[in-house]
Image (cartoon, rainbow, N blue to C red):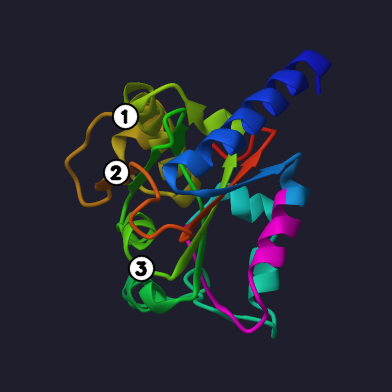
Amino acid sequence: MNPVKQWRNETLAKKMVDFLPTCGYTAYYAQNADEAKAKILELIPKGSSIAMGGSVTLGDMEIVDIFRGDDYKFFERFNVKSYDEQYNVYRQSFLADYLVTSTNALTKNGELMNVDSSGNRVAGMILGPENVIIVCGVNKIVDNLDEGFKRLRKVGPMNCRRVGHQTPCFETAECEDCQIQARMCNYTGIIHNGRKHEGRYTIIVVAEELGF
């Protein structure tokens, strides 16, 4: 990576890590995705039950296969035969010890912004598993809520394309605010801070671009 861009990424990530505890979050800095993956595994005791939100970031980190191993109880929401079965896993996942996910946007004021198709990730982050671990690449850091909403509209079409939802944005690459069942952007959540249940949220800020 260009050294100036890397300097910018590192500086921004470290600033966020210094700031986030003032909002009630636990925060860690990771230089890259490998360091973030190691930190996740360090934080989760063996034997824990783990749920996951859909995430390109975590998929690229190849952490799912580790969670599927004998050391953990994994709420398997990926290798299922039907949406009904997947939805049942979503509901059971609320009782997991840990939710591991990414975020669509993180504002410089410490707000976590996410948009979901089924709502399992948004709902689980707000009220669900006892612990929530969030991995955030520097590309997801935005100035404020307005910029965050713009980012949500930008990533929605890419997620539709990724999972094969036959929405208008699947073809146009731009949000069309469609009103169909296949719509990807049905539920939007904003977590303003981590103070209500201090210690529940851990945010790992990574000094590189991850996911969409």
From what the image shows, is residue 76 above or below residue 47?
A: above
Residue occupying the point 26% across, 29% down? 176
Tag 2: Cα neighbours inside 10 Å, few (<14), some, or many (≥20)? many
Q: Which of pointers 1 and 3 lies earlier in the amino acid sequence?
A: 3
Magenta stretch, residue numbers: 36-53
Furthest toward the top, the residue is 4
Height in image: 49 above or below 124?
below
Distance CA(mark 2)–CA(mark 1): 9 Å
Q: Which residue is mark 2?
A: 185
- How far apart marks 1 and 3 lie (CA) works out to 29 Å
* Element class at badge 2: loop
Q: Amino acid at mark 3?
A: Gly
Q: In the picture shown, does residue 8 fall above or below 27?
A: above
Quadrant where the N terminus sits is: top right
**Contact, mark 2 vs mark 1 (Cβ under 8 Å):** yes
Judging by the rendered image, the residue that carries numbered circle 1 is 175
Report the disc number at residue 128. 3
Q: Amino acid at mark 2?
A: Cys
* Neighbour tally class for label 3: few under 14, some 14-19, many 20 plus, Cα within 10 Å: many
Instruction: Give the mark, 2 or 1, whose residue is nearer the N terminus.
Output: 1
Whole-percent x and y of residue 72? 63, 81
N-term mark: 2 or 3: 3
Which of these two is toward me, 23 or 53?
Answer: 23
